[in-house]
Amino acid sequence: MSAYAAFLALARSLREILSLRRYVDPLDKPKIRSLSKKVDFIVTFLENYSDKHHGTLDCVGNGIRKAAFEAQDFMDLYLCSVSPDDDDWSSSSEADGEELNLDRDLTMASERIGFVWEELMKMKDSDAAQDLRSVSFSSPIDHSSTTKKMVVGFDEDLIAIKERLYEDAAELQIIPIVGMGGIGKTTLARRAYEDSILSDQYFDKCAWITVSQEYQRRDILSGLLKYLKNQQSDDSEAELAKLVYQNLLGRRYLIVIDDMWSTEAWDDLKMIFPNDGNGSRILLTTRLLDVASHAGSSVHQMKCLDEDQSWKLLQERVFGQQSCPPQLVDIGKKIAENCGGLPLTIVVVAGVLLLSSGQVMREQLWENVLENMTSREPTIALQCSKILCFSYDRLPLRLKPCFLYIAAFPEDSEIDAPKLIKLWVAEGFLKPNHQFKCLEDVGEGYLEDLVNRSLLFVIKKGPDGKLKTVGIHDMLREICIRKAEEEGFLHHVSSETNSRTESIKNPHRRLKIYSKKICLEWDILDSSVRSILLVTETLNGPTLYLCSRHICILDAPRVTLPSFSNVVSIFINLRYFAFALDHASCPGGLPDSILKHPNLETIVVHVTGFRTLQAPYRTLTMPKLRHLTWDTMFSLSHPSDMGIVRESGLQTIETVRDLRFTQEIIRILVNLKKLKVVYDIDTFWCGYFNLRNLFHLRNLEDLQISMFEVRGYSMTWNYAFPIGLMKLSLDGVPFPWDNMTIIGSLPNLQVLKMMRIKRSGDCFWNTDCVWTTEEGQFLQLKYFCSSLNCLVKWKTEKEHFPSLETLILHGVYSIDEIPSGIGEIDTLRSIELRYCIKSLVDSANQIQMLQHENGNDDFRVSVI
């Protein structure tokens, strides 16, 4: 697997070298083209071989893997050598006692690739003489839409848990759910939790936290506070505990504590939950009976599914509402029986079974699955582990490095989907195809594929339906970590308890570092390392000293590098860079040295100590930069000499302050897809910032505009937005409601958020603003969230929002009711009211009754 990943990255490096027309010796071009063709062939051969041999790559021995690594290293040296304006790196090489030798690097890489080529040719000739079975795969069916589908066999468990949640006992009740890994504890708790917060608002406060084995009390408290008050805090642990306690005091609450591993963890948390005698409940899941018994006296023990329940769940996951073909029933029951009654195993096996197409091919696949499941393993746990490994082995080769990368994320964490995809892009795992030219779109497809195969599960989706965060079951994560180590793909390392300095010397391509509080320094002496992903317990991370010049990914969002401009300038191959900035290391903001990285694709900046920093204006024109993200606002320094203005490849900018949309900026940002901009000034003058030019960002899909502390306006917004917008968020913007046709006419708009809309234009002095919608507007809008500021009435009909699925109203006090036409929309799934007046809640409940009468039983009203 690591060899395949190396060849993917090598293929990308060769393409990039060929694109550097001015810096590559013309005599080298034919050699490089020949190498590029051979590497492309090797990648294709490995993919085809893996598909033909059911996911295995037994043709790749240690010799081929070593040759792949060495070829990648030599061509990266060559790429560094021919990179323009690279004085810093050159001086670094000389200081290390190495001389640049382009011909040597090219020759050595050619020898290594030639060796791999010959070995694979032998495999190809040998393989052609064999009659091997192949399986045809079709697009996966999406069976991951609801949690309800996974509660097969646990109806009685769900009823029992709900009875305990709603029983008359006034004292605080702890309800432990115990069972082995993969049995469905979290699924059962999630179903009970979701039904509780969606159905009748019985509980005043609801929150869900995951503890895991390596938990941090501060993170737990911070997560609870985010649920309870929708805010984050940098307060001390003691202060956070006090805030959580105060927010729960006097309220009937439901807290789910998922994946508890020790009695000490419960003792560490139990004091923050008040017992007010009002029927509050804590639902706790654990694998350990002693932990469950320690937390609560009455333990709910989960049992494995019986054979009938196992078969029912397998059918549902593979065929949905359809019935199983008769010729597959007997073998299907045997497969279900061999899953040991564990829902996780059944779901993962179903992810393999549903990928076959054609009757003959499907029967072959099912027989092959059953054959591989037949085992003499002595325990259910070992058998389950073998089955889960089999599911990994059956993955298409293109998905394997993407799946193994999940091992780099902490246990029980919410994995940020956009970040994961950007890391895949930086590693070179993704290739454009006939359907998607944008690599990020390819990555979204890969991620959905892993979810559809039940190797990952969805935690959150955005309002546009795209994956926002995903997770992985503990058992699958353990297999992921083990496979990544066995195949030389990713190495885990953790600091010792009593060590203040750690060193890494052994050769590894990728490192996942877990740095404990006591560790202040990491000396990474391994010169072959390419990717470093660091997780730290502290808000301010340790110091990193790096020796490798091949660094491609440096994900250290809490680490401030010493001598920032000198250290970072040597990483010519750097593609993904997440780091911290503070005044001590970079008093002027983002240093100019960042501009010397011709291959940098993603910059993620975590700012500590102050609010707004500057970035060089020319950052926008970096040749390969795709994503520029700051967790706080940043401003652009004034350009001194832009030279010839060319369009950039930037797709994401967030969060930039007081950006002026000049003609030069529009020309540079023509490929931008996501923009988050904030205006934080005393007096706003629209003409100065050229907001009318926004219309020319023709590729923009997601636009977020916020205005704070703006005391005076010299505008009425009547400008058109980019025609391709799919998501629009306006916060504190002076936008008259009678101009809503500007937004409603956007043909692709699916998500609209309008918060703290200021009075302007005709509505500035008018306290009786009415918003009357029209037919033919908002044709694709699925999600609408607003505070409806300045409005006293909203007039609309069902035809005016023909695709609306979710309506969220936040802090609405001036409107008495939701228009009846909203309740008649056929596509409507939910209404959420946050801090709204009672009459608005009453009208929402009337809509719920209407929707249920019309057969829409899944419609829900949620009130906060």
Image: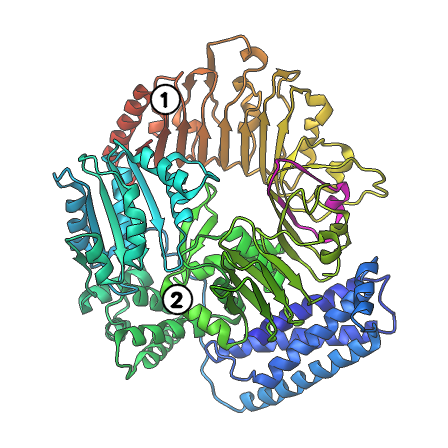
Front position in the image: 101 or 357: 101
Viewer-nearest of labels 1 and 2? 2
Query: Which residue type carries mark 2?
Result: Leu
Task: Say above or below: 21 vs 851.
Answer: below
Q: Which element is circle 2 on? A: helix
**652 part of magenta stretch:** no
Which quadrant, please, contains the C terminus? top left
Which quadrant, please, contains the N terminus? bottom right
- Residue 406 visible: yes
Front position in the image: 795 or 443: 443
Horizontal side of 116 relative to 77 (left or right) equals: left
- The residue at the point 46 percent across, 59 percent down is 410
Task: Say above or below: 64 vs 830.
Answer: below
Within 10 Å of disc 2 (Cα), the crowding (few <14, some 14-19, many 20+) is many
Q: Which mark is residue 476?
A: 2
- The residue at the point 23 percent across, 73 percent down is 337
Q: Position of residue 134 (x, y in %)?
A: 46, 79
Q: Which element is circle 1 on? A: loop
Magenta-colored span: 608-629
Q: Could you tell me if the residues under marks 1 and 2 are in contact, i.e. CB atoms within 8 Å?
A: no
Give the residue at mark 1.
Answer: 819
Could you tell me how far apart the alpha carbons at marks 1 and 2 are, in whole angstroms? 48 Å
Q: Name the residue furthest left.
A: 168
Q: Position of residue 825 (x, y in %)?
A: 36, 31
Horizontal side of 310 relative to 810 (left or right) equals: left
- The residue at the point 56 percent across, 21 percent down is 735
